[in-house]
Image: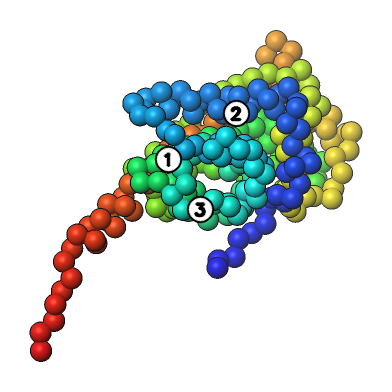
């Protein structure tokens, strides 16, 4: 097995993500709505579905708590898989995508949405500016994100047929830096495995907020960019190859 770096501490997902937080509910609904809009283009019905939402999964109408890195499903279990958010906290993304691929029936569809690309770019820039101004080292304070072009490559690497990836850029506003940080904590922004021990002092946060308001504010509100990346792939090519192999006559050797 290949070595996978532990960026996220998935054992904290159950306790750190506040599923009842109003903003978490809104973002979860947004991730689902974006996939539902794309699903409307399909002219078929899906009878066996899996909806993966962070640490929980609705599989054939049963609620199952699963390890996001080790899926418990048998091969060819579903014809539609919805993943809304968990890939944001996945260490072994290629490995998990391969597991989902194996869970699909012939002709099944996998769809995923998550925050990626340039999400929180304003906050990240202001943190870097404050660290440089105050002589602090650059700590790992934010979860790494997946670029749209890399998302398509990851799908292809996992074996999906005709993988596609696109992004939807959204901008919302908050009244203060503390409000934004509170939302990020509720979303699991503090599940990094190698969390920095350097405390965020009041002076540091004040410098970040002042820089934020100076650069990225309008009408007294802080602008926050979120890029929603969507991926879609089919489990078709694998079964076509299997049929070709089955239909190919075996070679008979002669002495």
If you read the primary sequence from the N terminus, does the residue marked by circle 2 or circle 3 appear first?
3
Looking at the rendered image, the quarter that the C terminus falls into is bottom left
> Which quarter shows the N terminus?
bottom right
Name which of mark 3 and mark 1 comes first in the sequence: 3
The residue furthest left is 254
Q: Could you tell me residue 85's position as x and y percent?
A: 60, 37
Give the structural element (helix, strand or loop) at label 3.
loop
SS category of the residue bearing label 1: strand
What label does residue 79 carry, if any?
Answer: 1
Crowd around label 1: few <14 · some 14–19 · many ≥20 (10 Å): many
Q: From this viewpoint, is residue 70 visible?
A: yes
Residue 2 drawn at (x, y percent): 55, 66
Residue at point 80%, 46% (across, down): 136
* Disc 2 secondary structure class: strand
Labelled disc at residue 213: none
Residue displayed at 35% across by 29% down: 44
Q: Which residue is mark 3?
A: 74
The residue that mark 2 highlights is 226
**Of 229 and 68, which appears nearest the observer?**
68
């Amino acid at each position: 097995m290949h070595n996978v770096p532990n960026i996220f501490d998935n054992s904290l997902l159950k306790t750190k993500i506040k599923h009842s937080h109003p903003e978490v509910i809104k973002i979860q609904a947004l991730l689902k709505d974006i996939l539902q809009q794309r699903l409307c283009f399909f002219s078929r019905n899906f009878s066996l579905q899996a909806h993966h939402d962070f640490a929980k999964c609705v599989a054939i109408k049963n609620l199952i708590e699963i390890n996001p890195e080790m899926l418990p499903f048998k091969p060819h279990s579903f014809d539609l898989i919805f993943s809304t958010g968990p890939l944001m906290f996945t260490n072994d993304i290629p490995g998990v995508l391969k597991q989902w691929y194996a869970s699909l029936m012939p002709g099944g569809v996998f769809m995923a949405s998550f925050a990626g690309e340039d999400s929180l770019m304003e906050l990240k820039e202001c943190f870097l500016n404050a660290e440089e101004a105050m002589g602090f080292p650059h700590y790992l304070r934010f979860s790494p994100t997946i670029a749209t072009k890399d998302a398509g490559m990851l799908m292809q690497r996992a074996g999906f047929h005709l993988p596609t990836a696109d992004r939807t850029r959204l901008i919302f506003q908050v009244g203060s830096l503390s409000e934004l940080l509170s939302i990020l904590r509720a979303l699991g922004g503090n599940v990094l495995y190698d969390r920095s021990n350097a405390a965020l002092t009041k002076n540091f946060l004040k410098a970040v907020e002042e820089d934020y308001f100076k650069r990225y504010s309008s009408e007294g509100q802080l602008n926050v960019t979120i890029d929603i990346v969507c991926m879609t792939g089919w489990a078709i090519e694998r079964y076509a190859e299997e049929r070709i192999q089955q239909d190919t006559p075996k070679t008979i050797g002669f002495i």
